[in-house]
Amino acid sequence: MFTSRTSPQAIFRLRLEAEYYDPEKLRQLSWMNQWRGRLVSLEDLCKYITDGTHITPTYVVDGVRFLSSTNINACWVDFQNTKFISAEEHLQLGKAKCNPTAGDILLAKNGKIGTAATYRQQHEPVSLFVSVALLHYSASLDRDYVTAFLNSAGGWVQFSRSSKTGVITNLHLEEIREVMVPVVHVDVQRYIGEKVRQAEAMRCRVQQLQKRIDDLLAPFKSMQVPTGRTSRVASREVSDTLNANAYMAQFVQAYRIVEERRHKTIANLSSSVADGPFGSNLTVTDYRTGAEAVHPVVRVKNCEDGKFNRTDLVWIDAEKQSELARSAAIPGDLLVTKAGRIGSAAVYPEDLPTGNITSHLIRARIKPPIDAQYVAEFLETPVGRAITLRHSFKSTRPELTKAEIEVCPIPLLTDAEMLEIAVRSRTKNRLSEYSGLLVTAATLLVEAVIEGKCSEREIAEAQQHLDSEDRDLDRLLLNRLTHSGIDVADAPKLYPDVEAFYQSLDAISDRLEEPAL
């Protein structure tokens, strides 16, 4: 709890909660003073602003996707993890304006309040729950610039200040309508909006790559699990594990699916397998910043969905790395988590220096011709997940040991199929990372402009040069961006290698399509 001091004259719209007058939020909104006369409300940018149905519909196994606030991310919509309603109910909700049309902006009213994304022409039909606001956009202001602003600190602080707190933090429609958007130069809008559109185009390509990977791994994407909690197993299927949970139907079935094919264990596929240092051998006091931060340390949060997540990497110095040489990770090593999200896999990136791992991971040096990226993709399938989870049941908490990961069987497809999966997976992961960086770049540039850290002229000229296929000014801007903002000393670069980003973009540019509204 905290208190705020404010004058009676500053009390606004009978808002009496202290959070509304939080001095830090007021300080963060001080940029609005410099933009007076160049601000426009969301209400003025939209024909109408409404929300999804207030009545929980009847869910079905398959049908029309039904979105809630959990599906709205910064500048993109998650269409995978949704519930479904019938086509008839979808049509009824459309009459109540609960179904978005191309060009609408979707905004989370609770949960991740203020998170916004554009609903595009290529998106499948959906209906909305009450937790999502529908902004029927009708202005000439670049709508993807608007979504970038709403996802920036400039938008979020307005939403956060106005949100109602209680059992659930939420936004009301009148508060959304009152949010102010700065009207920047048209070429600045275009430059920032193009970053968002390019990110969406990359996501479309990622989905195409994932579909082909899923086709190749189809035998491991679903299982016909017998009814019941346990299975009848042959004596040869009984391992050293005597925990009854290890013989649940889905685990036994997963092993049968793999072992009826050509396969090898992780130990047989690897030249060496090591787990991370235990106890006092590596603690948070060993982490370094600045010039001493030489070697990255991989934690559980850096491995997810078959890809390496660079967010929140920590670093150690050369001396500590030398002490921990046994668990060193080099480019191309397979990484598998032993605790937390058990069995998550990733491959150590080619562009990072030699690193290390915590005690919650193992690293396996997969021998050619098998590619570690193929193994990581398999381990993220339902069958792969079941195989690693089977060994995780312990008396205190779920976890894996190095020996248990070593005995996990990996199916061997044809050499051509495994290579194709690995290549497509690497491309998918790279595009997914760059897509996220483009959205981050868009929001950071919005903040830089409205706070006066970067002039409109600089960004407008960069867009004008891009129109002439000249990247020089764009390159300068991208090089100035860090994970903490623009021109922040000692902060890690948002694009450590801009040229690698351009090369990746050029390599797949003929496969990208601009997302239609």
Image (cartoon, helix red, strand yellow):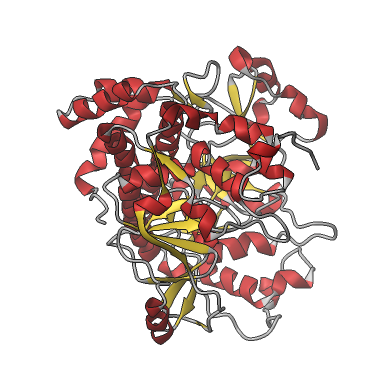
What residue is at 69 percent from the left and 24 percent from the top? 287
Horizontal side of residue 247 vs 120, given as left or right: right
Instruction: Please give the count of numbered marks on the rendered protein.
Output: 0
Coordinates of residue 62 in the picture (x, y in percent): 45, 80
Q: Quadrant of the C terminus?
A: bottom left
Quick one: 188 or 60, which is closer to the camera? 188
Coordinates of residue 514 in the picture (x, y in percent): 24, 49
Horizontal side of residue 131 vs 470, given as left or right: right
Quick one: 7 or 454, which is closer to the camera? 7
Q: Quadrant of the N terminus?
A: top right
Tell me: residue 516, above or below residue 335: below
Give the residue at the far right of this rendering.
Answer: 395
Tell me: residue 439, above or below residue 254: above
What residue is at 66 percent from the left and 42 percent from the top? 11
Quick one: 95 or 144, which is closer to the camera? 95
For residue 373, say whether it is visible.
yes
Q: Quadrant of residue 408?
A: bottom right
Q: Quadrant of residue 459?
A: top left
Horizontal side of residue 513 vs 376, given as left or right: left
Horizontal side of residue 59 vs 499, given as left or right: right
What residue is at 39 percent from the left and 41 percent from the top? 430
